[in-house]
Image (cartoon, rainbow, N blue to C red):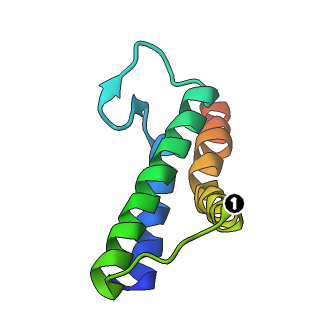
Amino acid sequence: MSAPTLIFIFFIVANLPWLNERVFCIYSLRRAKRVIVRLVETIVLYIISLLIAVAAELKFSGDIYPQTWEFFTVTFCMFLVLAVPGVIYRYQWLAMSQQQEN
C-alpha cells in the first residue's frame, strides 16, 4: 500500500463523521448528531487509521518503527486537516443551501 493510497483512505475516514447522520456509519439516532459525538467519532476513527498504518508498515517493512508523542500530535493534526472538507460541507454548505430554500 503506497503513501498516497493511505492518505486517500485517511481522507475518506476523516470525513465520515461529518458526511452522515449515523454513528460510526452503523447506528442511527432519532435526532441529528451533536458536535461532541462527531468529535469522539473522529478520535476513534483516527485510532483505527493508525492501526491501518501500523498494519501496512508491518506488512511492507516487517518492523514497526517506535514513535513518540510528537508523531501522534502531528498525525492527529493532519487527520483534522483532512476532515476540513466534511466540516465545511456540514456546517457551511448545508446551512447555506437551507437558507436559500427558505
**SS assignment at label 1:** helix
Query: Total marks drawn?
Result: 1
Indicate the quadrant where residue 23 lies: top left
Quadrant of the image containing the N terminus = bottom left
* Nearer to the camera, 3 or 8: 3
* Nearer to the camera, 95 or 14: 14
Q: Residue type at mark 1?
A: Thr
In screen coordinates, is 35 left or right of 48?
A: right
Residue at the spot 46% in from the left edge and 64% down from the top edge: 10
* Nearer to the camera, 40 or 29: 40
Name above or below for residue 50 compared with residue 40.
below
The answer to whether residue 7 is visible is yes
Residue 101 spot, x, y in % from top left: 59, 32
Name above or below for residue 25 compared with residue 36.
below
Indicate the quadrant where residue 9 lies: bottom left
Quadrant of the image containing the C terminus = top right
Residue 32 spot, x, y in % from top left: 50, 21
Q: Which residue is mark 1?
A: 73
Residue at the spot 42% in from the left edge and 75% down from the top edge: 64
In screen coordinates, is 12 left or right of 34?
A: left
Residue at the spot 59% in from the left edge and 41% down from the top edge: 90
Residue at the spot 41% in from the left edge and 74% down from the top edge: 6
In screen coordinates, is 96 left or right of 13?
A: right
Name above or below for residue 39 compared with residue 70.
above
